[in-house]
Image (cartoon, rainbow, N blue to C red):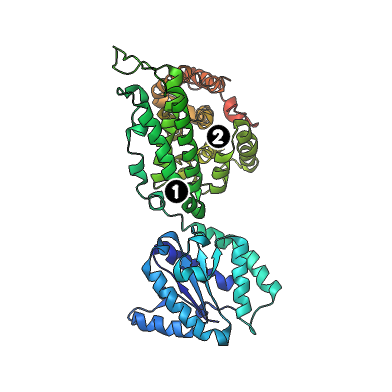
Amino acid sequence: MNIFICWSEERSRLLAKVLGSYLPQFIPGLQETSLFMSDNIPKGTRWFDAVEKELERANAGLVCVTREALQSGWIHFEAGALARAVRKNEKQSGGALYTYLLGVSPDELRGPLGAFQSTTFDREDTKKLCAAIVTSMKPDAPRREEWEKAFDDNWTKFKDAVKTIGPLPADKLIPDLEEIFRRKTFNEPIEECARQSWIDRFTGARETIAGLRTYGATMKADNSYLLDLYNELLEELDGYAMNMGALLLTENRFEISPDDGKLAIGNGIKRACESRRGRIRQLVTHLLAPNCAPVLEAESRRYAKIPSFEAKKAIMIHPAEWEIQRTFNGKETSKLTKDQLSACAVSLWEFDRIYFYLVQERSVSANIGQLVECLEQEFEKLRAVDGGSSLIPLHYATRATKRTLARPAVRRKKAEISTKVRLLLTSIEQFLKEYDLDKSQQVRDNIKEFRALLDVPVGEAAGQRLSEEASPVASPY
């Protein structure tokens, strides 16, 4: 059984290498030497001669299709040549030609590629591909129970290997993504819109929504974390347009403040529109950021889709907190590597950062300086969208920093951070008051305890209890 694996562009090549490594593990009896891809051609060999030779002996073919490969003329050429070779040999081997799709839906295939049997990156679909290959291996095919067990044993490793390839960047999936949002509708605060062209703003938001929705099938086929950000961006755009339609599309005109030259727009209207606009800008930044991928992908994506704060706590945060407490051994308490944990600290995904803070509360290696920086960053994220973001990460960042500082070994560093932290806590309190946030007072209570801890002289034991608490503290957010 000779299988020719066809690819074009880098992600397609990586997919081909993973399939070439795992197909023999899925199917006992299928030899790695029976699988050919052009990377296997020895240095110094005439490339076209080697490919032609392998095409002649191929009795099955596998075309690795990613979104950028789909646009490649080469993959259509090579797939056509492969189809002719397989057709010539199929009377002897009963082979076939398959396409394996990553981030592409079957209905997007055109021309010769559309005629082949397609397989998507899915457990059951991949298993069907293996079954088809096994059928073509007769009379040397392994028993069904043998290859199915091998498939089940190796699927998770294969899935993880494919996921390391990563999705295509958002600006490749949505061309001109950055340019789409380079307009005053999204970049100019409403109180600075002296022309008061609310209809233009509203129309701009609706046009942007319509344009983005044309990429829905592309994003759905990609089915990575970028799809979650894309869907959330559409929701925020829709909310932004609805708020402007309800609050600004009237005959009312706002007076200009003599103090700062900005429009005297009420805080209610301002916050309703500006929090949406800030969140839109934040989501576009996340889509374009090179480090946008979540560390805890499944958990972070699930967390982001849970609508209520109470459900986020019950379903995601508290189970993670209890897991960390159960595995705490006095040294390290995380299932992640040191590098992965560091990536969580600066992740754009809320659950990644919350998990980092939960670990720091228990870890003896927690760095108080890093936690203060994280607390500052959480405040900046909240302020960037005028209080329109979640308070949950800020709550856990405050709690982790407070509990870490309560440790005797860390409290000696209090003088180094005291001034900076006091100013930061004051700014957070003022912001919460300005936007009427933290109605349950949990963040403020944490800040109050934090200030008391800063006032305790080094050497006294007050506050040590904070670092020794074993039961999880619930957040109301």
Q: Is residue 134 left or right of residue 176?
A: right
Q: How many marks?
A: 2
Report crowding for label 2: few under 14, some 14 to 19, many 20 or more residues within 10 A (C-alpha).
Answer: many
How far across and down, in percent of the image, does residue 399 sit?
54, 28
Q: Amino acid at mark 2?
A: Glu
In the rendered image, residue 145, in percent from the top left (x then y), is placed at 71, 72
What residue is at 39 percent from the left and 34 percent from the top? 203
- Cα distance between the residues tagged 1 and 2: 45 Å
Could you tell me which quadrant the C terminus lies in?
A: top right
N-term-proximal mark, 1 vs 2: 1
Q: The residue under label 1 is which amino acid type?
A: Thr
Residue ranking furthest to the front: 251
Residues at circles 1 and 2 in contact by the CB criterion of under 8 Å: no
Q: Is residue 412 visible?
A: no
Quadrant of the drawing holding the N terminus: bottom right
Q: Which mark is residue 163?
A: none
Q: Which residue is mark 2?
A: 361
Secondary structure at numbered mark 2: helix
Front-most of residues 371 and 44: 44
| 163 to 213, vertically: above or below | below
Which residue has dot 1 on it? 214
- Where's residue 243, x and y in %? 47, 27
